[in-house]
Image: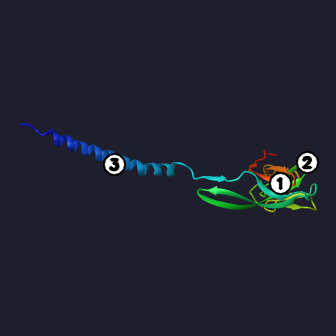
Amino acid sequence: MQYNTDNQGRRGFLVRATQALSALIGGALGIPAFVYLFTPAKSHSTGGWVDAGDISQLKLNAPEELPFRRVRMDGWKIITEKSTAWVVRLSEKEVVAYTPQCTHLGCAYHWEESKGQFLCPCHTSNFSIDGKVLNGPAPRPLDRYLVKVDGTRLLIGPEQSKTKGA
């Protein structure tokens, strides 16, 4: 008795073709899911330096709080964040910009002109005009923004410069 091998060949071909098609569909659905699960969402600043304004009128050793806006991507959303920097002209050529949070617990501090110090109301940390800790539980000097001066314009960098312990 002879068997017709053409049917076996066609059946085998259909089985293999179905398996290959299933693998392609599974890969087409699985690769995007894998990429979504194992790659972090984009979260980055879209620009480099931010123009924080004109500093030509900034007086020597007189801190001023300057507001600025930074644009960043969070996933696929564009977010405009408002922030501020405490800007101090320490000399004719040196300008620094401090982040607005105390280095102890992140409270907002202010400039106390009568004392010539930055004061944090949360836990009474005091900082000198150059950002050094004078008193209190703050573990390190005030954090600084990276800055550049372009003519009379102050440019604030994309990242903060974390200061080392006092």
Is the residue 160 above or below the residue 108 in the image? above
Residue type pointed to by label 2: Lys
- Identify the residue shown where x is 33% and y is 47%: 21
The numbered disc on residue 93 is 2
Q: Identify the residue position indicated by label 1 in the image.
A: 154
Disc with the residue nearer the chain's start (3 vs 1): 3
115 vs 37, nearest the viewer: 37
Coordinates of residue 89 in the picture (x, y in percent): 90, 53
**CA neighbours of label 2 inside 10 A, class few (<14), some (14 to 19), many (20+):** few
**CA neighbours of label 1 inside 10 A, class few (<14), some (14 to 19), many (20+):** many
Is the residue 84 above or below the residue 8 in the image? below
- Identify the residue shown where x is 78% and y is 58%: 100
Coordinates of residue 109 in the picture (x, y in percent): 81, 60
Q: Identify the residue position indicated by label 3 in the image.
A: 22
SS under mark 2: loop
Residue type pointed to by label 3: Ser
100 vs 65, nearest the viewer: 65
Q: In the figure, is residue 19 to the left or right of 150?
A: left
Q: How is the image coloured?
A: rainbow
- Identify the residue shown where x is 45% and y is 48%: 31
Q: Are marks 3 and 1 in contact (CB under 8 Å)?
A: no
Q: Quadrant of residue 111?
A: bottom right
Mark 3 to mark 1 CA distance (whole Å): 59 Å
Quarter that holds the N terminus: top left
129 vs 151, nearest the viewer: 151
SS under mark 3: helix
Coordinates of residue 120 in the picture (x, y in percent): 82, 60
SS under mark 1: strand
